[in-house]
Image (tube, rainbow, N blue to C red):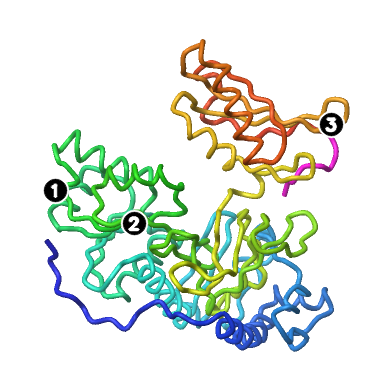
Amino acid sequence: MRLLKMVKSEVKWQARTREENLNLQRKKLKEILVKAANATFYKNKFEKARIKPEDIKDLEDLKKIPITSKAEIPIAAQNNPPFGGILAVPQNEIIRCYISPGPIPTALTKKDVENWADRTARILYLCGVRPGDIAINAVSYHMVPAGLMIHDGFEKLGCMVIPTGPGQSKTQAEIIKNFGVTVVQGFTEFLLHVAEVARKDLGLDPKKDFNLRLSISVPLPPRPERNRIEEALGLKERATQIYGIGEAGWVAAECSAEQGLHVVEDAFIAEVVDPETKERVGPGERGELILTCLDTEGSPKIRYGTGDAVTLTDEKCACGLEEVRILQVLGRIDEITKVKGLFIFPSTIEAVIKKYSELRRFQAVVDRPENIDRLTVKVEYLGAPEKAEELKSKLLRDFKEALRIDTNVEFVKPDEIKPTDKRLVDLRKGPVAWTK
């Protein structure tokens, strides 16, 4: 039962046509580039590339600006503490500063904080959150921006938010029951643990004792695995997902059609580039997600390399929205390598293995005997010995379809692969691997 009356809120997802989004991006890009040039970091970058903000006349010209990698800002901050020249406004205009691992400072003005809250509220709205919802926010509130960003968004949307943070699973389960919580936001593994504690320690049945409509997490697995989350939490609607980075806030959200995550295009220009050549790739092709943030003036992010491997599409979604969508978040670029000219993603291998209950941990090993690339997937096999070869044949077929190259499969004993082992090991010599 809800404890709050419906709260009036004007926040909604702002649907625009493709051309309307592009026109708005053109306008905002020109404005943010002028502001970014006030930051020593970008002023130096522009001068080194021999470009000025006024040289970027259209979205296509954006590629003239060099990409900024995650590693650059910590180095700049170390050489010129504490901000490394990233401030585009006087420091006395900064009212909030997040510190992401690196460390990477993200400095926000009052206007930035308001923009991020509005953007996050719209993201939550697209996920299905509505004014009057009672939300638990079970992510960290200190140093990194994840918790506070979502909190601001819930408040902006007109929800009651309980800032639980991570941990204290038993207490969180009690809060969900006693307060009639309708939305939970947190990492999937933790939310599943809360549901398990509710059953085992409190004797609760989430389907009967919880009033949850939605769970919101960072990118979720595809169905049918997602059904397990909905079942465990007793969700009345669905488990949904969002995407963001600490240095730029929440970026995209999934609609009810579940066909990817819609990028907030009045706040971001999203590109995908080949991680080796840094050239843009076509729609649906894999590469690194590059973001230009259009609504942040304190510490702008221009062509910022997220380090995340994704695929994008600009096709219209089944829900009717026309924003660019992130179809897949495939993993970190430093987890990925190239075999026979194709990028190999541990997440793709994992998706195949999760289809079979007899399989557990895996490790992909790339080597080059006789100068020919070879990929071997070692995987722990828990099934009957007499069925091993049959399953191995299925895996060879599945990997061929998913990876588009021939793969060797090697079954190993349970616990032979440690949880801390790398999921992908490249034993080749020479500059053939994607290692950034």
Q: Quadrant of the N terminus?
A: bottom left
Residues marked 1 and 2 touching at CB (< 8 Å): no
Q: What's the distance in space between the residues labelled 3 and 1, CA to CA? A: 58 Å
In x, y percent, where is residue 133? 23, 67
In x, y percent, where is residue 120? 41, 71
The magenta segment: 429-436
From the viewer's perspective, tell me whether residue 187 is left or right of residue 133: right
**Three-letter code for the amino acid on which mark 1 is drawn:** Asp
Q: Is residue 33 left or right of residue 239?
A: right
Q: Which residue is mark 1?
A: 209
| Between discs 3 and 1, the one toward the N terminus | 1
Q: Say whether residue 74 is magenta.
A: no
Relative to 382, is 311 above or below? below
**Front disc: 3 or 1:** 3
Q: Across the whole image, how many numbered discs are drawn on residues?
A: 3
Q: Position of residue 68 (x, y in %)?
A: 70, 65
**Label 3 crowd (10 A; few <14 / some 14-19 / many >=20):** few
Answer with the quarter of the image where residue 61 lies. Answer: bottom right
Please state if 271 lies on the left or on the right of 139 as rendered.
Answer: right
Q: CA distance from mark 1 to mark 2?
A: 18 Å
Tag of residue 185? 2
Residue at image position (39%, 46%) is 226
Please identify the quarter of the rendering in which residue 429 is found.
top right
Report the mark closest to the observer, 1 or 2: 1
Residue in front for this viewpoint, 268 or 146: 268
